[in-house]
Amino acid sequence: MLIRFFFMLREGGLKVSITEFLTLLEVLKRRIAGYSIDEFYYLSRACLVKDEAHYDRFDRVFAAHFKGIEMLFGDETAEIPEEWLRKHLERTLTDEEKAQIEALGGWEKLMETLRQRLEEQKERHEGGSKWIGTAGTSPFGAYGFNPEGVRIGQDGSRNRRAVKVWDRREFRNLDDSVELGTRNLKVALRRLRRFAREGAADELDLHDTIESTARNAGLLDIRMVPERHNAVKVLLFLDVGGSMDDHVRVCEELFSAASGEFKHLEYFYFHNCVYEGVWKDNRRRHSERTPTLDVLHKYAADYKLIFVGDATMSPYEIHYPGGSVEHWNEEAGATWMRRLLDTYPKAVWLNPEPVNRWPHTPSIQMIGEIMDRRMYPLTVSGLEEGMRALV
């Protein structure tokens, strides 16, 4: 059975090796996991999946192989609308009423009926006995009662009668084809790592402690080392205002993820294109600016430079003095961009605009040329590609 599972994983896009599969078999032989499908799920995922971004693919293959609910759909993206499962009321049944409710009659019948309901149902239902909904006696839904049903969208167990719990897959949004979220942003940013031990020696070095104790005739000799931190230094330049207002959420998530991932992170804001001044507080952007030359002189060339912006502006803002929409700039934005790139050769531009719009926006093409085509979409795969370019 597991050999078929192995080949299904490979067909599903997971590069599972024979060595990893044999490791799983060895772990099972040693009975590290009990007789629980949940324990086997986490154990097999730990052995066979090397990248968190592939957890969703693993979930789909696992569900299909072990006859989970996802195998019911030809379209793996099919979902039940949230409105159908929203709790508006909760029905209370007496013991006599519960006794009168009959089960459909087994797993196969339950799954086949659910398939039919999904094909036929077009709207929300509440309090009924047939459709997917809430507060009723249907086998499918939430906050109701049935002696044998599929719990869908309910927070926690109530009657402990469900034979199958269909919840949203935990790592669904880690696939590289979907929009970003803070978690998968962190996963993508981890491509940019270089660990070093910094600070006080306050972390136990277990290996050295064992060796030192052995050399000391068994007398405990504790060895400490500084903690390991990501030593990569990042300069983050964030475009704000104007057309970037449409991308505030994803930029906030990126900033949050970067703040948690990089110990050495410096950030500045700009509008459309970088000129002679940048700022750290948007409420004081006109009164408390940092000269761009100060940034160039303060931060060493080993910093990685990341621009985040839609690069959507008038071409005059890039190539002409005085082209800024906010003030009179003595030098063109392109001049300041090249100064930054000359100082920080490891640099990328992350663009939240859909890639299919790039060829039709002259300013995006112009910024892309200045960046030597190191412009990447602000998606999981684009962010990962950008982080590889910075290594």
Image (cartoon, rainbow, N blue to C red):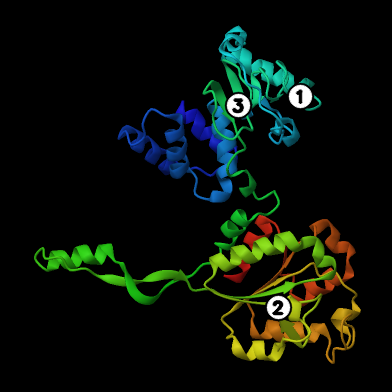
In the rendered view of the protein, which quadrant contains the C terminus?
bottom right
| Residues packed near mark 1 inside 10 Å, few (<14), some (14 to 19) or many (20 plus) | some
> What is the residue that sits farthest to the left in this orientation?
217
Residue at the image position 66 percent from the left and 91 percent from the top:
294
The Cα–Cα distance between marks 2 and 1, rounded to whole angstroms, is 49 Å
Label 2 sits on a secondary structure element that is loop
Query: Label 3 amino acid?
Result: Arg
Whole-percent x and y of residue 163?
A: 54, 21
Q: Determine the image quadrant of residue 334.
A: bottom right
Label 3 sits on a secondary structure element that is strand
Query: Label 2 amino acid?
Result: Asp
The Cα–Cα distance between marks 2 and 3, rounded to whole angstroms, is 48 Å
The residue at which mark 1 appears reads as 125
Query: Label 1 amino acid?
Result: His
Whole-percent x and y of residue 208?
A: 24, 67
The residue at which mark 3 appears reads as 151
| Residues packed near mark 3 inside 10 Å, few (<14), some (14 to 19) or many (20 plus) | many
| Residues packed near mark 2 inside 10 Å, few (<14), some (14 to 19) or many (20 plus) | few
Whole-percent x and y of residue 356?
A: 83, 56
Can residue 202 be seen in this snapshot? yes
Question: Closer to the camera: disc 3 or disc 1?
Answer: 1
Q: Earlier in the sequence, mark 2 or mark 3?
A: 3
Measured along the vertical axis of the image, is residue 297 above or below residue 346? below
52 or 386, which lies in front? 52
355 or 285, which lies in front? 285
